[in-house]
Amino acid sequence: MKKIRKVVIPVAGLGTRFLPATKAQPKEMLPLVDKPIIQYIVEEAVAAGIEEIIFVTSSNKRAIEDHFDRNFELEYRLRQKNKQANLKEILRISDMANFVYVRQKTPRGLGHAIFSARSLIENEPFAVMLGDDIIDSRVPAIKQLIKVYEKYQDVVVGVTKVAKKETDKYGIVDPIFIDQKTSQIKKLVEKPAPAKAPSNLAITGRYILTPEIFDFLSEQKTGAGGEIQLTDAIARYIKKRAGYACTYDGDYYDCGNKLEFIKAIVNFGLKRKEFSSQLKKYLKGL
Ligand code: G1P
């Protein structure tokens, strides 16, 4: 069985929901406390043993490349000022993995973004992680999916329960449960209206895919929102092969949504020893 060594992280979106904050910087660089959102995603992948990070980018995303690269001037100045802790952290970021970039030439949806990475994947299974979706968990969520992949050796998506009225924001699975946390997927629907949703188990930005998915993506027609949807390609794939859903342990934050992003900042802030009690006191006083 081939090991999951690579992850594709699509970061080509315009981030219009966060304008004007995203006018001149990628939304993926917005900080959760003091770390850009995208760094949490990369750290989750690295903690799961992934060695190569493939970013699917567009124009205006250079800050992401710079963030994961060396910055000699900054290193020099931190050394001069003897800021050893900062220096160590800065060096650690660029050493975490092998970073590779490919452009999505036209914004045609998530399925199209993943297809843009085809030539970099070759013939091996790989992970996909979405830049908006933060999962706070003891065992990295993507590692929990890899475990399911190792057992069934086919496509796996990470799911969590969402409110029934919110099914139209997500890819929703129709599950046949194998055990409490794992199910085989009978059907997948992208952003169904609540009345049409087969369940309230939503895909939240974590996938293990096999290279055969590219054959399905290459001929995928446009779906919801007039875009080439990854969900639709997986839905066709599982009719020929099989797909599994992993209800991971962890707290999910949709950082593409302003309110959820603020909740994530508060929750991650409350975990910081250096000011958690002060923050708690402040929140109680509001
Ligand atoms: C994408 C996927 C959807 C998934 C969601 C998770 O939608 O198409 O299936 O549930 O991410 O965040 P988007 O949020 O890009 O519209």
Image (spheres, rainbow, N blue to C red):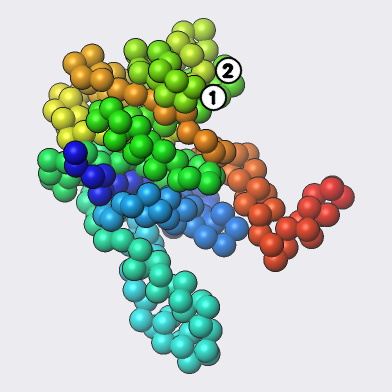
Badge 2 density bin: few <14, some 14–19, many ≥20, Cα 10 Å = few
Q: For the point 20% across and 29% down, which residue is it?
A: 213
In the image: residue 190, left or right of residue 218:
right
Mark 2, residue position: 165
Which type of secondary structure does the marked residue at label 1 adopt? strand
Asked whether residue 227 is in view, the answer is no
Which residue is at the far right? 285
Left or right of 230 in this view: 75: right
Q: Is residue 276 above or below residue 150?
A: below
- The secondary structure type at the circle numbered 2 is helix
Residue 31 lies, with reference to residue 14, above or below; the image says below
Would you say the beta carbon of the disc 1 residue lies within 8 angstroms of ligand 1? no
Question: Is 196 on the left or on the right of 268, as rendered?
Answer: left
Q: Quadrant of residue 52?
A: bottom left
Name which residue lies at 24% across and 30% down: 153
Q: Nearer the viewer, residue 249 or 65?
A: 249
Inspect the image, locate mark 1, and give the three-letter code of the amino acid beneath it. Lys
Where is residue 282? Give x, y as percent.
82, 54
Q: Which residue is drawn at 12% across and 40% down?
A: 123
Q: Residue at x 35, y 68 (%)?
A: 94
Whole-Å distance between the Cαs marked 1 and 2?
12 Å
The percent coordinates of residue 106 (x first, y second) are 24, 40
The x, y position of residue 103, in whole percent, is 23, 49
Q: Pinpoint residue 100: horizontal percent, then vertical percent.
A: 24, 57
Judged by depth in the image, the label closer to the viewer, 1 or 2, is 1
**Residue position marked by numbered label 1 in the rendering:** 161
Q: How crowded is mark 1: few (under 14 residues within 10 Å), some or many (20 or more)?
A: some
> Is there any visible trace of residue 243 in the rendered image?
yes
